[in-house]
Image (cartoon, coloured by chain):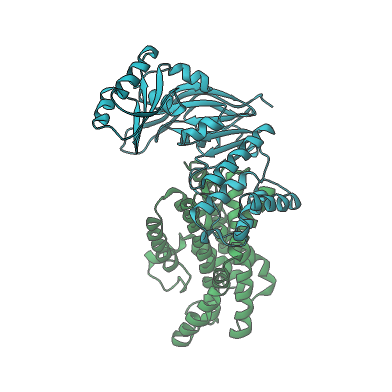
Amino acid sequence: MSEFALEVENLVKVYTSRGKAPIRAIDAISFRVPSGIIFGLLGPNGAGKSTLLRMLSTLTRPTEGTAKVLGCDVVKRPIEVRKRISSVIQATAVELFLSVKDNLLTYARFQGLDKVTAARRADALIEGFQLGPQVDRKVQDLSGGFRRRVQVAKVFMVNTPVLFLDEFSTGMDPILKRQVMNLLRTEVEKGRTIILTTQILSEAEELCDDFLIINRGKQIARGDLNTLKLLSQGVYEITLAFDHLPENIQAEIAALSPIRFTIEANTIDLALKIEESRVMEVVSALSRNRHVLRVEVRGASLEDIFVELTTREGKELT
Amino acid sequence: MSALSAVVYREAKIRATNFTFIFWDLFFPLLYMLVFGVGVNSALGAPTGIGNVSYHEFFLAGILAMASFAIASNTSWSFFLDRDNGIFYEMLTYPMSRSEYLLGRVIFNVLIAVAQGALTLAVGRGLLGIRVQWPKLPLLLAGMAIGTAGWFFFYAIFALRIRRNDIFNSITSVFYFVFMFASSMFYPLEPLPVWLRRAALLNPITWEIDWLRYTSIGIGNFHLVLLEGAAFLIFSLACFAYAVRCLQQQE
């Protein structure tokens, strides 16, 4: 078995449809993911994340290039790949006409789990995902959040070495999301590899050991958080809380051309790409003749890095 | 094999949760036979040119073919349901081949069709006195099984290639009309105009009906029926191969 969970070489996916220009959804992407980590695949809407996951999970055939899951080529040995993976796709994929428990048991059957183990795991997951009161209800009668729970619970029924999670936390309440994140960490400690896409960058920052950022089908950054921070050197987050929100502060901030900024009640939060020596200058300018309750200056967060990298047009960073 | 059994298990679980569906699938041909068949038999009597058989007897094969056609159409329609709620795409990442997935989808429904055929024959014999050729029963049930599978693969091609279920529904409505009326389902072909007879002879449902008619009540030319049976088998295999290809191209 390969030491890499994923090996992707010059992967290309072009969608063609009659009368329309071809769309290059994935454009010569190459990367490797070692086993036993959580790998974050990030990018804005339409970047090609789901297309990439679909190719890795054998749903879509690449136009060019190769992709291997634990050494098995996704085109040449698709069934071997499928034996090694579990997927939570973006849509809420559940068996609407089956009960919660039957959803779990049917999934286990597809994955070749024996009945006793399947029943034991299903009971544990029903408890863990707080699905007890709904266990015998048909999934079509449940809310979107509960359906998502059932879908995510399914992948914990089995021990496939690689797990693909496409926007797994959509529709989950914060408490459940926290539990699932802990569960994912435990699974990684057991040796599983998790490939996840998410739009919630704080979630990715907390969970992922390694990242790939793509935009318009192209790879724009790769590495762990520290590596990405180096790529995005000079980005600082500044938080200022005032006793009351100063007039014209919005215009003053806009004049600084921030990467992003938010104003909530009396607090402003902005991310700037500036030289380190100018940070305190900016803080002083914004605080002058104002009553400041709190000042915080931080290095870039994943969100800042993401915004900075994905808005740099046409620059290859890796 | 375990993948195939898992798909069959899933189909059975889903269908078993809907008793109306099962009831309708099992009793639909009976109702057709007891209402439509009895009505035509009473009003128009025996069909001409095919020997001493009542309309009940003549229509029996048509009912069985219609039932397999309907089961196949309903089963293929469920692709849309599965696609809409995403489970279709998730299932394609499960450890099985595309052909196992397609075969699994049809096996449970073939069993329903076979049970339905046996039930219809028993009631037809008991209530309407249809003279069933019991020794040919295995061949008849095999015809029901291959008929249901063949039509499912045929419909699956359209269900997999068409993304909108309203377009699919329009196409199946046209198929219902063309396939059923340009065939030997409701009437013998001999009195028909030449163009309609030729169209019916090229229609795979005629091949299925002629097989079912020969194996149920013994009417038909053995050699022609054999040829038609072989043609239907080839039609089914070709549809299966193309449906697998369509499934491989799902994106």
Could you tell me residue A70's position as x and y percent?
Answer: 64, 29
The answer to which image quadrant residue A303 occupies is: top left
Could you tell me residue B140's position as x and y percent?
Answer: 63, 67
Relative depth, front residue between B28 and B242: B28
Residue at 50% in and 53% down: B82
Relative depth, front residue between A66 and A217: A217
Q: Colour of chain A?
A: cyan
The answer to which image quadrant residue B227 occupies is: bottom right
Q: Is residue B124 left or right of residue A25?
A: right
Could you tell me residue B225's position as x and y percent?
Answer: 57, 64
Residue at 47% in and 16% down: A230
Which residue reaches farthest top? A277
For the N terminus of chain A, which image quadrant?
top right
In this view, B183 is above or below B242: below
Relative depth, front residue between B130 and B197: B130
Could you tell me residue B80's position as x and y percent?
Answer: 46, 54
In this view, B229 is above or below A91: below
In this view, A42 is above or below B159: above
Q: Is residue B182 left or right of residue B21?
A: left
Relative depth, front residue between A96 and B187: A96
The reply to whether residue B131 is in sight is: no
The reply to whether residue A7 is in sight is: yes
Which residue reaches farthest right? A116
Q: How many marks?
A: 0
Q: Colour of chain B?
A: green
